[in-house]
Structure formats: C-alpha cells, structure tokens
Amino acid sequence: MSHDLDLLGAISEQMLSLFLEDNDLDTLTDVLVEALEEALAILQDEISGETLH
C-alpha cells in the first residue's frame, strides 16, 4: 500500500477497555467510525490510482 498507516491514531486495546469500562459507547462509536472512514479514503485512493487496460 502506498499510504503509511497512522499508528498513533489507532485505537489501542487499553483505550478500548477504558471506553468499555466507563460505558462510553458514544465516544467509542465515534472513534471506530472515524477509523472506518479513514480506511475507506485510503482504499478509494488506491482504487482511483489504478488504470484499466
């Protein structure tokens, strides 16, 4: 893949357990949606860079 993953922005297991422990599901959902949107953007960039022959 041509993009480097942002490891600093990735959710850690410790952070995940804190969200679950505090029952902070809205914030957890926001973080997960943001991660999915970022992954989709990377995939769209990869697809748009391909050429058809």
Image (cartoon, rainbow, N blue to C red):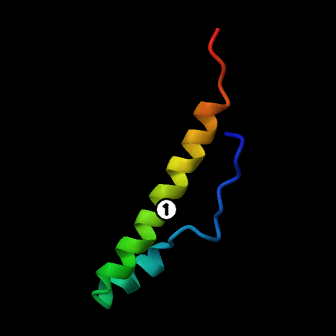
The residue under the point 38% across, 81% down is: 27
Element type at mark 1:
helix
Instruction: Name the spot of residue 10 as percent of width and height, x first.
Output: 56, 67
Picture coordinates of residue 13, whole percent (x, y): 45, 73
10 Å crowding of disc 1: few (<14), some (14-19), many (20+): some
Q: Name the kind of residue labelled 1 in the image.
A: Ala
- Farthest-out residue, bottom: 22
Q: Position of residue 2 (x, y in %)?
A: 72, 41
Q: How many marks?
A: 1
Q: Look at 56% across and 40% down and name the residue there.
A: 44
Q: Is residue 31 above or below residue 37?
A: below
Instruction: Please give the name of the residue rendered at 50% of the width and 48% of the height, measured from the top-left corner.
Output: 40
Taking depth in this image into account, of 19 and 42 the one nearest to the observer is 42
For the point 41% across and 77% down, which residue is it? 16
Between 5 and 49, the one nearer to me in the picture: 49
- The residue carrying mark 1 is 35
Instruction: Give the quadrant of the N terminus.
Output: top right
Instruction: Tell which of 9 and 48 is nearer to you.
Output: 48
The quarter of the image holding the C terminus is top right
